[in-house]
Amino acid sequence: MMPSTGVISTAKVGVSVLIPHIRGAVTQTERPPAFQKPGDEEQLRRDRARFEERLAIATAHADYKFPDEIAEDVLQAVRERRFYIITRPDIALRIAQGRVDAMRDGRAPTTAATEQHRDHEQHAAR
């Protein structure tokens, strides 16, 4: 065990995790051609379907902020040294719970996130 030097406790460096829900933003879910191999066709089809679903959700929600609308909130959170910066807690917390549930159930996390996005879409439509 190394002795403590106190350097970490006096450091002026902080870390924040931004979890954005940005209007019009879609995560790339397709594998780049260099990482595709024969037999991946079904996974590529599922990836494409997930991409299309997320694109439809992201462009349909007027309640998602644009990046410039989020910037000031992010700067303020960094100044406050907040670790998590969540632009839409109502969505992000459901997605996080879905991912925890997926880990517990042995499912892939992308399935959990997709289900939570779908759930948000259904609630927004009501």
Image: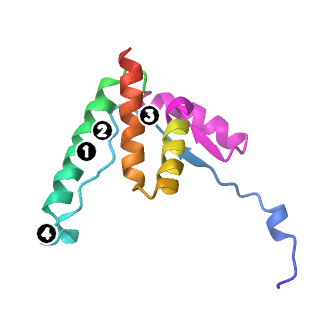
Badge 3 or badge 1: first in the primary sequence: 1
Magenta extent: 65-91
Q: Residue at x 42, y 34 (%)?
A: 22
Residue 19 rendering spot, x and y as whole percentages: 52, 43
Mark carried by residue 51:
1
Q: Amino acid at mark 4?
A: Gly
**Which residue, given by chain and number where applicable, does mark 4 sit on?**
39
**Which residue, given by chain and number where applicable, does mark 3 sit on?**
67
Q: Secondary structure at mark 2?
A: helix
Badge 3 or badge 4: first in the primary sequence: 4
**Which residue, given by chain and number where applicable, does mark 2 sit on?**
54
Q: Is residue 54 left or right of residue 46?
A: right
Badge 4 or badge 1: first in the primary sequence: 4
Q: Amino acid at mark 2?
A: Arg
Q: CA distance from mark 1 to mark 2?
A: 5 Å
Q: Secondary structure at mark 1?
A: helix
Q: Secondary structure at mark 4?
A: loop
Q: Residue at x 62, y 50 (%)?
A: 16
